[in-house]
Structures are given as structure tokens and as C-alpha cells.
Image: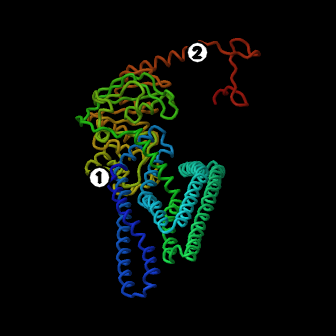
């Protein structure tokens, strides 16, 4: 906003002459009644008319320039901060779990831009001229000035009441609408589940409840605003008529001329117009003000990243020291005191029960979630030392919830980089073993719907694996890459892992399928957010087998629970309800 200070000053400069030229009509009317009609001079009429035509043409030209400047101010503000707002929204989404309120700043940016580009600011620049118009009316007659001042004050009070009466119901309506939209978005994402489980009616009722509540509050707010708007419009017309009546009384008393009476009525209408326009555009002004404060708070909270010196291409050497990670939403500790190191060009398998923190560790290793303690270092550098746009080109990541974007298959594999090369895309697809699948889908130029809805889960996972392998990244993290794969896809994954290791790339794979651990060099075992074991694959597997043997032998040493009616030493076995019977000889 401060960068547009000069443009706003030019708006004020043009507004000065526009409002000054607004006096053309009343003064022309004054001259017509008091001079032309009295003298019956046609030359005077022609000269005055030509002058008025030129002044109105100039005023229209200034209005045109002012509107164009306002449109460009809004566009320039959008262009200056839209990148920062988008980056801040993505950063906010990481720390809020990606809920629907994360994208609110993008809507606020649009609201601010549209208000600045519209007629709202023009009425604000015209408002300071209200006292000047009232002063001109005072010059005509003192009583006319008092009447005009009272009229302006009444309309200003109505504008304040309009804001106060509509503020609460508008806020409640926005909250209810936001909750309804969240239910609708969740329903669209889970339409299959809702249909299969018969939940469609229940979700529809909850959405309908929120929408009806929003409709009630919106109706209340609009009724209140509409009532005051109608009152202000009727009051303005009445006050102009009152001005004519007061002027007529003064004309009868020969205190002013008929031309002064007409001019005072027209100037009053012009004086009240900014106030009335403020009432009309008040809701837009309030929304723009809220959007301004919201964006200002967001950009203050999330400052722009400082420019960093580019570092050399990483080799993939990874080191984790005393890592602690909490949930962005609940701030609950998920990982505690994780320590391990991984040489470049090796494969690490991460295992553990569900909820052990494996996916959280994957996010931390990619720099998606920032640690609250300890650090993650790639080639001895923490993530805050890297330029994330540059570092991201040297990293590969396949998240557990695979998502593709609307576009072509080759664009998704190339991460939507505008300067991609075909051989890099084909190489990544061949290494991932998905080249044949892509050709069956229609080729690399085949379209993918939004969120990849026209592909199966396994197809999306295999294409996302090719995206993770694009341009041979130094470090690749794969979170459950074979959760949706068939035998062919599983074999292609094993081949891709071996190819990456032979290429000197560091690979971290999270899996529940133990067969894939046969090609790993190291294994990290997590249990309830803590590091239970780490080392080379043979050593860790040996220790896991020993622990399992001890657990089995320990349970075997526990005395068996006998039934009170069961003789000691006898084991009774039953199968189903029919019991167990020995097979007859020969059968």
C-alpha cells in the first residue's frame, strides 16, 4: 500500500478538480436564472453553454483517468504481494494440517484488490469535499447552510448505524457459511464413502443446518442494511425538497434569488452524494478493511525468506541429531530424541507399528515439518541454510497420501517446471518402471483430472514415484510406496530402488512389507515416537529376531490357565461347536 502512495496522491489531485468542476452545474443554473433569463441575451447563453460543455467534458476525462488509476493500483498491489501471500498460505497450511481456513488469505487478497479497483475509494476521496459544498451553501444563505449541515449529519449517522446493526449478523453468517463449505468439501472428497455407508443424508442435514443458519443471518443483515439504505435515499430526496421549500421561502422574502434557490438544492444533492455512496459501499469497505488487517497480520507473522547463497549440489549424506517433532495442530510430541546418520548412496528402511511416527519422520527429513529440538542436516547443512526452491530440485518425495495435479502426465512428472526436457521425463518413467503404463494411459501428453481422479490408486502411486525420481535427486524419501501396488508395480519398485542405489542416490523407504527390506543397507526401528534400534540390516534383523524369541519364550513360561473342571495336565481342545474328533485310520 505504501508503494502506491504516489498513485493515491494523484487520485487526490484528480479528485480535487473533479469535485471543483461539480460546481459547474449549479453555477450554470444560477447564471441562467439570474442573468440570461433576466437579460434575454442569447450570446451570453451560447457562451455559457459552450463553457459548461467544455468543463463537463474535462470532468468526464478526469473521472476516466481516476478510475483507470484505481484499477491499476489494485492490480499493482496484487502483483506485488500475491507471491508472498501464496507462499505464506502454503506455510500456514503446513502448520494447520491443510484445513479450509488456510486459503482464506487468498480470498482476502482478492477482496482487497477488487475494492481498491472499484468505485468505493472514489467516494472516500470525495467525502472531504462535503464541508466545502456546505460552506458554499452557507455563502448563499445562513439558514440554507444550517439545513444542509443537518442533512449531512443525519445521513452520516445512518451510515454508522448501518455498520453497527449489520456487523454481528454478517460475521455470524460468514462463520456458518465457512462451516457449511467445509462439510461440502469433505463430502466431495469422500463421496464414495458417503454413498456406500448411507451417510449422505446425515452430512446433507449438517450442511443444510449451517446453510440455513447462514441464510437467516444474511437475511437479517440485509434487512437491516436495506432498511437504512431506503431511509437514507428517501431522506436525501426529502431534504433536497426541503431545501427547495426553504429557498422558495427566502425568495418570497426577497433574501435570495430564484437561481440561488435552484443552485443550493443541486449543491446539497452533490454534498450528500458521497455520504450516500459511503452507505452503499460501506459493506465493501468493512470487508476490505478486515482483509487488509488479516493480510497485514499474516505477512507480519510470516516474513519473507531472506535470499541465501546457493550451496553446491548435495551428495545425499544425511545426519539427524536429537530430533524432536510436535504436531502442528495439537503441539503433541510425536518424535523424541531421534539420532542416526546415513552415508550417501545407501538405502535406509524405516519400520515400526502404526502410529510410531514414521510418516512424521519422513516430513521432518524433507523439511516439511520444522523440528522443535535438534536438527536434520543434508551434507552438514540444515534446511534453513538452503534455498528451498533450489534444494527441492535435489530431493525426491513420495508421501503416503499420493496426490497428482490437474494437467498432463509429463507435467506432473516434471513437477510442472516450465523448462523440462523430454529425456529427463522418459528417464524417470523408465527408472520407475512406469513407462509402459503411461503409454497404455494415452502417452505422456495424456491429461490427468484434478487430484488424479481418473487414475487408480496404484497408477497414481507409480506416476508419483517417477516424479520423485525426476532428474536423479540426491535424497529420495518414499513413504509406503508399495501400499497400492500389485506384483508388477512391486517388482518395478524394487528395480527402481536398486537403480537409485547404483546411481549413488540416498534412499529412505518406509514400509510395512518386510520383503523390501532385503535390499536395504540400514534399518531404523521406531516405537511410540522413539528410536528403538538402528544399524546395518543384518545386525538390526538379528536383534529383532532375538527380541521376538525372548518374547515367545517368556510367554511360553507363563502357566496355562486351567478350567476348574479340567484335570491337571490334560488339554481340552474344541473346534467350533461340534468339538474335535480324531480321524479314523485310513482316512
The x and y percentages for residue 362 are 41, 33
Cα–Cα span, label 1 and label 2: 63 Å
Please tell me whether residue 472 is drawn above or below residue 108 in the rendered image: above
The x and y percentages for residue 514 are 44, 30
The disc, 1 or 2, on the residue closer to the chain's N-terminal end is 1
The x and y percentages for residue 141 are 51, 67
Quick check: 525 left or right of 192? left
Mark 1 or 2: in front is 1
Residue for point 42% across, 27% down: 372
The answer to which of 98 and 441 lies nearer the viewer is: 98
Give the labeled residue for mark 2. Answer: 556
Work out whether residue 190 can be spotted.
no
Give the labeled residue for mark 1. Answer: 418
Residue 537 in which image quadrant:
top left
Please tell me whether residue 525 is drawn above or below residue 170 in the rendered image: above
Quadrant holding the C terminus: top right
Few, some or many residues within 10 Å of mark 2 (<14, 14–19, 20+): few
Please tell me whether residue 229 is drawn above or below residue 39 in the rendered image: above
Residue for point 34% across, 47% down: 415
- Provide the secondary structure element on which disc 2 rests: helix
Please tell me whether residue 94 is drawn above or below residue 147 in the rendered image: above
The answer to which of 458 and 419 lies nearer the viewer is: 419
The x and y percentages for residue 20 are 39, 66
Few, some or many residues within 10 Å of mark 1 (<14, 14–19, 20+): few
Residue for point 46% across, 46% down: 293
Work out whether residue 370 can be spotted.
yes
- Provide the secondary structure element on which disc 1 rests: loop
Amino acid at each position: 500500500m505504501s508503494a502506491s502512495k504516489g498513485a493515491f496522491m494523484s487520485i487526490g489531485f484528480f479528485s480535487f478538480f473533479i469535485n471543483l468542476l461539480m460546481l459547474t452545474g449549479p453555477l450554470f443554473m444560477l447564471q441562467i436564472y439570474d442573468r440570461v433569463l433576466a437579460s434575454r441575451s442569447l450570446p451570453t447563453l451560447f457562451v455559457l453553454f459552450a463553457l459548461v460543455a467544455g468543463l463537463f467534458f474535462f470532468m468526464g476525462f478526469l473521472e476516466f483517468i481516476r478510475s483507470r488509476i484505481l484499477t491499476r493500483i489494485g492490480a499493482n498491489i496484487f502483483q506485488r504481494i500475491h507471491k508472498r501471500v501464496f507462499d505464506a498460505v502454503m506455510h500456514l497450511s503446513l502448520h494447520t494440517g491443510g484445513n479450509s481456513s488456510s486459503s482464506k488469505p487468498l480470498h482476502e487478497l482478492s477482496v482487497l484488490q477488487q475494492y481498491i479497483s472499484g468505485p468505493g475509494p472514489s467516494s472516500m476521496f470525495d467525502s472531504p469535499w462535503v464541508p466545502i459544498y456546505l460552506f458554499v451553501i452557507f455563502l448563499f444563505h445562513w439558514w440554507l447552510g444550517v439545513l444542509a449541515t443537518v442533512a449531512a449529519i443525519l445521513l452520516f449517522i445512518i451510515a454508522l448505524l448501518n455498520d453497527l446493526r449489520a456487523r454481528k449478523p454478517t460475521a455470524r453468517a460468514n462463520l456458518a457459511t465457512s462451516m457449511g463449505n467445509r462439510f461440502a468439501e469433505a463430502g466431495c472428497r469422500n463421496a464414495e464413502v458417503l454413498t456406500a455407508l448411507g451417510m449422505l443424508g446425515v452430512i446433507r442435514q449438517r450442511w443444510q443446518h449451517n446453510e440455513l443458519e447462514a441464510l437467516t443471518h444474511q437475511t437479517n443483515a440485509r434487512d437491516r442494511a436495506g432498511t437504512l439504505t431506503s431511509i437514507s435515499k428517501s431522506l436525501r430526496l426529502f431534504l433536497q425538497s426541503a431545501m427547495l421549500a426553504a429557498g422558495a421561502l427566502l425568495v418570497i422574502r426577497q433574501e435570495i434569488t430564484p437561481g440561488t434557490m435552484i443552485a443550493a438544492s443541486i449543491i446539497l444533492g452533490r454534498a450528500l452524494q458521497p455520504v450516500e455512496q459511503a452507505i452503499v459501499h460501506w459493506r465493501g469497505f468493512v470487508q476490505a478493511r478486515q482483509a487488509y488487517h488479516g493480510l497485514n497480520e499474516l505477512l507480519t507473522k510470516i516474513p519473507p525468506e531472506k535470499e541465501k547463497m546457493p550451496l553446491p549440489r548435495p551428495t545425499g549424506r544425511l545426519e539427524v541429531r536429537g530430533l524432536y517433532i510436535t504436531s502442528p495442530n495439537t503441539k503433541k510430541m510425536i518424535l523424541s530424541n531421534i539420532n542416526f546418520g546415513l552415508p550417501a548412496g545407501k538405502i535406509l528402511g524405516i519400520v515400526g507399528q502404526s502410529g510410531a511416527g514414521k510418516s512424521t519422520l519422513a516430513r521432518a527429513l524433507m523439511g516439511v515439518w520444522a523440528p522443535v529440538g535438534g536438527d536434520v542436516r543434508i551434507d552438514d547443512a540444515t534446511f534453513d541454510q538452503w534455498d528451498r526452491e533450489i534444494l527441492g530440485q535435489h530431493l525426491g518425495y513420495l508421501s503416503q497420501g499420493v496426490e497428482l495435479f490437474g494437467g498432463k502426465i509429463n507435467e506432473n512428472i516434471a513437477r510442472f517446471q516450465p523448462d523440462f526436457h523430454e529425456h529427463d521425463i522418459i528417464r524417470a518413467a523408465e527408472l520407475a518402471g512406469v513407462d509402459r503404463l503411461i503409454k497404455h494411459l494415452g502417452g505422456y501428453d495424456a491429461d490427468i483430472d484434478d487430484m488424479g481422479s481418473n487414475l487408480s490408486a496404484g497408477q497414481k502411486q507409480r506416476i508419483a514415484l517417477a516424479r520423485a525420481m525426476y532428474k536423479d535427486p540426491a535424497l529420495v524419501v518414499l513413504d509406503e510406496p508399495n501400499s497400492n501396488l500389485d506384483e508388477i508395480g512391486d517388482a518395478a519398485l524394487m528395480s527402481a530402488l536398486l537403480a537409485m542405489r547404483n546411481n549413488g542416490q540416498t534412499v529412505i523407504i518406509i514400509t510395512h512389507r518386510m520383503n523390501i527390506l532385503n535390499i536395504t543397507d540400514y534399518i531404523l526401528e521406531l516405537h511410540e515416537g522413539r528410536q528403538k534400534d538402528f544399524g546395518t540390516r543384518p545386525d538390526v534383523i538379528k536383534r529383532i529376531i532375538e527380541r521376538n524369541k525372548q518374547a515367545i519364550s517368556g510367554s511360553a513360561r507363563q502357566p496355562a490357565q486351567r478350567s476348574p473342571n479340567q484335570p491337571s495336565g490334560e488339554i481340552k481342545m474344541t473346534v467350533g461347536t461340534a468339538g474335535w474328533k480324531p480321524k479314523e485310520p485310513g482316512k
